[in-house]
Image (tube, coloured by chain):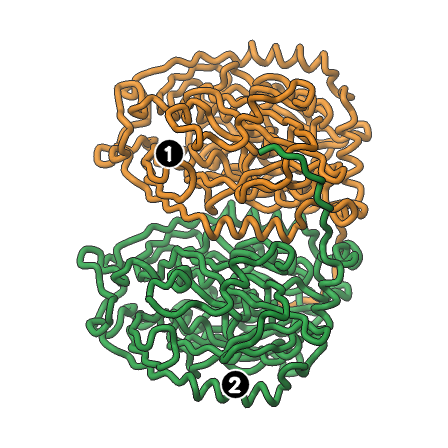
Chain colours: A orange, B green
Amino acid sequence: MHNTSAAPPLRHPDVRLAARLAASAAAVDGGVMSNAEFLAWFGERQREQAQQVSRIPFAELRDWGFDPDTGDLRHRSGRFFAVQGLRVRSDFGPVREWAQPIIHQPEIGILGIAVRDIGGVLHLLMQAKSEPGNVNGVQLSPTVQATKSNYTRVHGGSAVPYLGCFRDCPPGRVLADVLQSEQGSWFFRKRNRNMVVEVGPEVEATEDFCWLTLGQVNALLGSENLVNMDARTVLSCIPDWQSGSDGDGEAADSARTGSLHTDTEIRSWITRRRAEHEVATEPLPLAEATGWHRTEKAIAHERGLFFSVVAVDVSSHRREVPAWSQPLLEPHGIGIAALLVKRIGGVLHALVNARVEPGFLDVLELAPTVQCTPENYAHLPADDQPPFLEEVRRRQPGRTWFDTVLSEEGGRFQHAQSRYLIIEVGDDFPTAVPEDFRWMTRCQLDTLLRYSHHLNVQARTLVAALRSL
Amino acid sequence: MHNTSAAPPLRHPDVRLAARLAASAAAVDGGVMSNAEFLAWFGERQREQAQQVSRIPFAELRDWGFDPDTGDLRHRSGRFFAVQGLRVRSDFGPVREWAQPIIHQPEIGILGIAVRDIGGVLHLLMQAKSEPGNVNGVQLSPTVQATKSNYTRVHGGSAVPYLGCFRDCPPGRVLADVLQSEQGSWFFRKRNRNMVVEVGPEVEATEDFCWLTLGQVNALLGSENLVNMDARTVLSCIPDWQSGSDGDGEAADSARTGSLHTDTEIRSWITRRRAEHEVATEPLPLAEATGWHRTEKAIAHERGLFFSVVAVDVSSHRREVPAWSQPLLEPHGIGIAALLVKRIGGVLHALVNARVEPGFLDVLELAPTVQCTPENYAHLPADDQPPFLEEVRRRQPGRTWFDTVLSEEGGRFQHAQSRYLIIEVGDDFPTAVPEDFRWMTRCQLDTLLRYSHHLNVQARTLVAALRSL
């Protein structure tokens, strides 16, 4: 392995990146496709990609079935995903022990956005993509959203476009590449690579794809059910162009402006909460998930709460596989994900919650201030209602910076919507908060987003939303 | 929850910390206890804490026994730890599928070093502590090493001294607080809080404890089997006083000097290796671990390789519990953990290996360039020998910066020793390395050490050793 070679030149972080992203964020109309053109194009994609989705009994699922021993719901290939049971014991929240169905999808997929300099401005290659569980068919998606089963073509379909941009990306063209979790109440330890890579002029937008500036995508985040969950999580992993720790001296951001807690204190708080919360999860045959019952068309909780597992048949002439059927997880009720923000000493801070979800790899992740489906708490006493939910309910319109209903992943969830809110609170709102909450700056959130499993998927949507304002 | 309060002042990182640590590292003899006094004191501790440790048949274990259904070895309280089976399937290394015994210890303990300014120099509160598996009885240990069973007093013993310094530490006094893994081949997802906290003059050294400067502890790292594993891992989590990213503008270290790969590229490489390596582990009744056999005195592999599980009886008049018996894992052969280092463009880089171990929480962690017990590879062909082992064997004494046999945790492992090496390679050594290896700067290692589960326990010892030179 020994050979003589000149030492390669040392590399430095790209000091121009923050300014290039800021310029793209400032471009609120497009150089490639104007906002008006986008809306016309997107409407056409919706008509073109129309899918017929219908609820079917489990018995009519093709290639999916219940394991006779365990009752688990699986694909006959053993790939894609499976619905199994999980027993949870924790010291957290009003209910300390329960069983539930949960989706197992151990493969790590790729969610990626390609960016390209067009006319001196960075543009994002976005995709109009339909998913069976979407309330409205087509949503704006990343360049690539591919499970390993997907891109290794277990289903025998066509190749995933642009996948090579991400799998074979030269190291110097990577802007972000980090494993991030998905819903820890619905998925068991699922995570995806969230990638942003810069591509050259050889990459062009084909049918169903378009080039938009960061400013255009940011504006679209405020449209109901338009930017999909996968696009939002990738957007949140882009280095923060306003307060990030990359670039020309921005590293000193917190050192310059200060923050309520130092970075070391924030990390220590996360470590302590992870060490002190005890959560034990144990895979369980689905048939043994107490309190859950299977009928011909659904697996549902005996009180009608939380979610059901259902089956759908999907037909479309344009997807990789012409027609298919699959299970979906159907949440009951519309979730709330709300981030309280407040200027402290002149610096914007957001209130995050160290939240235990049974499917997280590492006990807990940072969640929005409030994350719940209020219906699931209706049967519990007042003391067990989620903290700060009242502040969200009593919000003033003038201080509500963001208020948009957005969809969760339509490939796994049936009509799953959450109302995402960013609400400014006043000077009279206390900086002292319960032990599972902390005020953090944008720069601190940005740093944690570079390392896996610190912000949950709902918090990541709200970081993307906060940056879009 | 609303009340009016003045906004608290914003906080900033402690810009003096790096200089204070550097001053302590430069103090190579002690203000509190001279090196000569330390050696006399330590020798006395060894005599005072003498333990009688003898191998016993499993049947003579008190409070431990084999589960009749699974063959797992457990404490009757269900606490402490258990030896269970694990089935492993991976795409990594010459052997792709195996079963093995592994230690389950799901509780998160605390490993902590208290530091105190004495006479203007930071001193570390170190402990002389015996463990039954140590080859030499007493080793130099952190202020606190306590499992949760330990400090919640499952064994009915006395309180853990100084524990309050860590459990009730004010946030501003924390220098480091991070969850780190232990041996991923022997432990299933075990991790501990690694903490360094600053304490005030009210904290004094009691019997078995002493105050040493960082320079004194660094020098002792070069003594055979003296600084124990728990102390070494905590030392590695101290912010790097020479090239850390804290303090007065040190953040720009890599930006100033450059590195072979940018931080973004390093994180992307870790993400890719985690996404692409497939490792599936499945808990197994110990009795079903194929290839392993239980006799009256040991659970051993049929070829005599790897390790055995044995039982010991321990008597001592000074430990929390006067006498006890317990299982230990006894490795066969002395391990090698070697880090190759090289100046690239004038900047020191270390060659780390993205290493899959079955007990890691997140697929892989960064390991030394070479980490193996050569005997375990003796039956495999030349192509399956560990990469770079030959470079370690052919090292020149003048370029061997560190070469010391050190012990692994004597509370779980019987006579487990590894030879830790830091070897400088010449300009002719290639910077291009196989895909599972990367050259990284000290500053890059320091940054990753602030986030959990990036460097494995052997790499952490070598980071502590590298800083001690």
Q: Is residue B84 left or right of residue B13?
A: left
Q: Position of residue B294 (x, y in %)?
A: 23, 68
Task: Give residue A348's quadrant in the image.
Answer: top right
- Label 1 sits on a secondary structure element that is strand
Which quadrant would the N terminus of chain A be assigned to in this image?
A: bottom right
Q: Is residue A424 left or right of residue B310?
A: right
**Which chain contains the residue that carries disc 1?**
A
Judging by the rendered image, the residue that carries numbered circle 1 is A102
Question: How would you rate the neighbour count of disc 2 (Cα within 10 Å): few for under 14, some for 14-19, many for 20 or more?
Answer: many
Q: CA distance from mark 2 to mark 1?
A: 54 Å
- Label 2 sits on a secondary structure element that is helix
Which residue does the image show at 54% across and 73% down from the upper left?
A: B390
Q: Which amino acid does the dot numbered 2 rest on?
A: Phe
Residue A429 visible to an observer of this rendering: yes
Q: Position of residue A320 (x, y in %)?
A: 48, 23
Q: Position of residue B194 (x, y in %)?
A: 54, 61
Which residue does the image show at 71% across and 76% down from the upper left?
A: B119
Judging by the rendered image, the residue that carries numbered circle 2 is B42
Which residue does the image show at 59% across and 80% down from the upper left?
A: B220
Question: How would you rate the neighbour count of disc 1 (Cα within 10 Å): few for under 14, some for 14-19, many for 20 or more?
Answer: many
Q: Is residue B461 left or right of residue A156?
A: right
Task: Give residue A452's quadrant in the image.
Answer: top right
